[in-house]
Amino acid sequence: MSKAQLNRTKIASLGSDDSQCHILHIDMDAFYASVEVRANPSLAGKPVIVGGTQGRGVVVAATYEARAFGIHAAMPMSRALRLCPQAVVVAADHAQYAEVSRQLYQILISITPYVETLALDEAFLDISGSIKLLGRPVEIATKLRAQIKSQLALTASVGVASNKFLAKLASTYAKPYGLLLIPEQKKIEFLHPLPVGALWGVGEKTEIKLKESGLNLIGDIAKLPIETLNRIVGEGVAAHIYELCWGIDDREVVTTEVEKSIGNETTFGEDLFEATEVEAQILRLVDQVAARLRNRDLSAKTICLKIRFHDFTTITRSKTISSYTHNTQEINQIARQLYRNLNLQRARIRLIGVRAESLQPTNQANFQPTLDQPDLGWPEAEIAVDQARAKFGVAAIKPARLISEQD
Ligand SMILES: [Mg+2]
């Protein structure tokens, strides 16, 4: 049975319960080769090999058409060309792959700040915090693939599961250009018929030891007493393998990069000078910034206010607080105070900007409720606002003061 056939059968038999599946593993299909085909559409549908042609060149990547001839990464180019003499060989353009990888990363962090990149074309996403706003895991995965297709003109496969090991396995079986969900209740059913080589992190030597002991399938290992497995591969490795065989993997998605700041600014058609107008604009900007923070599950420790005057002089003021926040009211208090401290007497203002800096994923930022903060009620209300906006658009809901003073 081919992987594609296996995949279709699995999807049909595994069902669609994605309730505990908050980890996505995304993997671009034949990444380097696909980028080359995109750059030169006449290569579409042909066996294309990316790699060095000189001397001892090796295959770096190959399209699925080339892989059908048995060509794979790390194979000597001379051997690849014997297997498929008509293959088109293209030199690797690493700067281009890095650029596409950056664009991919931007798409991924628009879904969640919890992105762990494994390679230029591969990443884990923890979408626990995105489900309320963006939908169920399979919906998010589907949208993500569509977004990659439309924005990058490249295809990706996505695995959806309850942990990293299963999600990575799922994307492998989803390839090419597929989506595979492994429902938590079906993970054993999925895992146990697979060959032991499918265990992530099990090296070649361990695999050989397992096979020499007659253990060919993951299910064979799972049924062994742990003592027996200890004798075969050693205690440390045995404990790790045993957990994987039962679909257990506690490794968390480790954020590899966080956005440095989130800000919004507006230039006004006519200069502002009334304090009430300026403060209403600050609140409007804070509201946008705070919603973006919450949307990405980020919190900020530093709030900056930027003001540009009629004569283009620009000043910025910032305040760093003792704990992280993504709360509109709290950020507004800070930004407004920064403005009031300037003590401007009807100065003509042409631009106002609000920026949140020193960002952290919210669940890694320590919150300290402060005494003067109406901390009960507001965060929940803000989540409701974000949900309504996701549904009806940003303009649908505004802070009360803006409704009376604007539009
Ligand atoms: Mg890949």
Image (cartoon, rainbow, N blue to C red):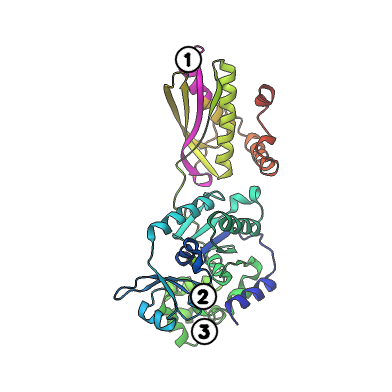
Q: Residue furthest front?
A: 42
Who comes first in sequence, dot 3 or dot 1?
Answer: 3
Q: Secondary structure at mark 2?
A: helix
The front one of 12 and 97 is 97
Residue pictured at 50% horizontal, 58% vertical: 252
Q: Residue furthest top?
A: 345
Q: Secondary structure at mark 3?
A: loop
Of the residues under marks 1 and 2, which one precedes in the sequence? 2
Q: Nearer the viewer, residue 98 or 116?
A: 98
> Which kind of residue does numbered mark 2 sit on?
Glu
Q: Position of residue 26 (x, y in %)?
A: 53, 61
Q: Disc 3 or 2, which lies upstream in sequence? A: 2
Residue interval drawn in magenta = 336-364
Q: Position of residue 25 (x, y in %)?
A: 54, 62
According to the picture, the residue beneath numbered tag 2 turns out to be 65
Q: How many marks?
A: 3
Q: Residues within 10 Å of mark 2 (few under 14, many from 20)?
A: some
User: Which quadrant is home to the C terminus?
Assistant: top right
* 59 w.r.t. 145: above or below: below
Nearest to the eye among marks 3 and 2: give it: 2
Residue 256 against residue 277 in the figure, above or below: below
What kind of residue is marked 1?
Asn
In the rendered image, residue 130, in percent from the top left (x then y), is placed at 60, 50
Residue under circle 1?
A: 343
Please name the amino acid that badge 3 sits on: Asn
Q: Give the alpha-carbon distance from disc 3 to disc 1, as whole Å.
A: 76 Å
Residue occupying image coordinates x 54% and y 58%: 153
Disc 3 and disc 2: Cα gap in Å?
Answer: 30 Å
**Disc 3 target residue:** 216
